[in-house]
Image (cartoon, rainbow, N blue to C red):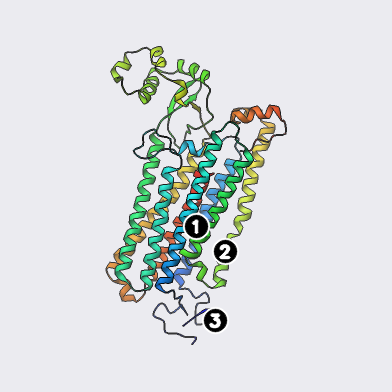
Amino acid sequence: MATTATTHQTKWWSGGKSPFNLEYGKLMMWYFLMSDAFTFGAFLISYGSIRFSQNFWADSNAVFNAFPGAGHANLPLAFVSVMTFILIISSVTMVLAVHAGHNQDKNGVIKWIAWTIVGGLAFLGCQAWEWHHLITGEHAVLVDGKIELIGQTMRGNPWGRVVEGSAVMDALRNTPKETLMKLVEEHNHTVAPAQLASMSNDNLIGMLNTAEMHVREKGPIAFGGYFFGITGFHGFHVFSGVIINSIMLIMTSKGVFERKGHYLMIEKAGLYWHFVDLVWVFVFLCFYLI
Amino acid sequence: MDHQQNTFSPEVTFQHHHSDAEFKKRVRKTTILLSVITIIELGIGLTIYTLHKGEHPSPLLILMFKGMVCILTLAKAYYIVSVFMHLGDEIRNMIMTIVVPLSLFIWFILAFILDGNSYKNLRNKYDPHFKESTMPVHEQKQDTIELKHSGKE
């Protein structure tokens, strides 16, 4: 059979065959992925450029320390490692789907493509939870001499420099009652909201432990735009990958590739899916690890 | 010999034949490798976290760990592209049409990171308000002691 020996003997450029020994669609998928790599690369490099232009940047271990169902526990890197492993495993199931296609094994392709789709959906679910948690989770931030509760959005970043205790006390005296009540509720679930409403501001402040509050200044505003922009763009790739894989699943089960005699389409979808995993490796590096 | 029987696609002259056992071994090996590298990365991430929590985090040590994570990430990328995407099995000319353009990233990364860094240094030099309002507190103290300190990140 064909081995590397024939590779050298074959006159690849004499016409009548693909000089790259690749099907046209697959080759074009490679070039598309290369250009997509530059798109993602440009986003990530822009993020790096802005980050290097700042003296202070939000500490990723403070930002991403939550885990579903774990409440306020401080668990840096835990959830994102789950997401990373989900994508690695779904990449492996995709390899197995492509291999089953090589062997003309229709049921194998169906089985492994289905698992790949499950992995993609699980990843998207994780990302939805993470975004929701970041946007709605409010943190005490010192703004204009008073405490405000803000979440991680495109307009604000609650992970600036840590504020010292005495400055927190001063700020609390300027803080409106509504915010004070929320702050007390966050750490103290024993008192009913109606009871809190009847208390004076000084009493409410007395119930707060300033050391426990972790009050910070506002952080670099660009953080939100880059994080949501880049992980959103990646999430969009995962989403379209799930759609493509679903179409492949339907086509396979209808026997389209069986009739064609080859499963090259699965290979192309596979390339795209692996690329999504590849990009995540770099997003993981840039946002969560360094 | 040149024109072999091919049910695959008329454009493909020869196919790569991996036996099932060989393929399974390769996939299992790569999966384990990727998982192990990820676990090491997480370990380094947690090390950086504990270093940051410490009294006097050494910027050089943290930078070193970050560099290690970057190298491990490149290793992961290599295995995904080479084994999972089968780029390693393709014809050399084809590999080069993908890899050579990607080398543009070397300039791309260096130029923009250095530009950002230079912008920071200029602002710290000419805009004292920027420096005062954004410099991490512990580095501000160091700054007053040794004037040459540049304030990394």
Mark 2 sits on what residue? B99
Tell us which disc is closer to us: 3 or 1.
3
- Amino acid of disc 1: Asp
Q: Residues within 10 Å of mark 3 (few under 14, many from 20)?
A: few
Distance between mark 2 and mark 3 Cα atoms: 24 Å
Query: Please, is residue A221 above or below residue A113 in the view?
Result: above
Q: Quadrant of residue B122?
A: top right
Residue at image position (31%, 19%) is A191
Distance between mark 3 and mark 1 Cα atoms: 34 Å
Outermost residue to the bottom: B1
Q: Is residue A187 left or right of residue B152?
A: left
Please state the horizontal and vertical placement of residue B137, each as a whole percent of the image. Answer: 59, 28
- Amino acid of disc 3: Ala
Mark 3 sits on what residue? A5
Q: What is the chain identity of the residue bearing mark 3?
A: A
Please state the horizontal and vertical placement of residue A126, each as a whole percent of the image. Answer: 37, 46
Q: Residues within 10 Å of mark 1 (few under 14, many from 20)?
A: some
Q: Element at badge 1?
A: helix
Mark 1 sits on what residue? A36
- Amino acid of disc 2: Val
Q: Element at badge 3?
A: helix
Tell us which disc is closer to us: 1 or 2.
2
Tell us which disc is closer to us: 2 or 3.
3
Looking at the image, is mark 3 or mark 1 earlier in the sequence? 3
Distance between mark 1 and mark 2 Cα atoms: 14 Å
Residue at image position (48%, 73%) is A22
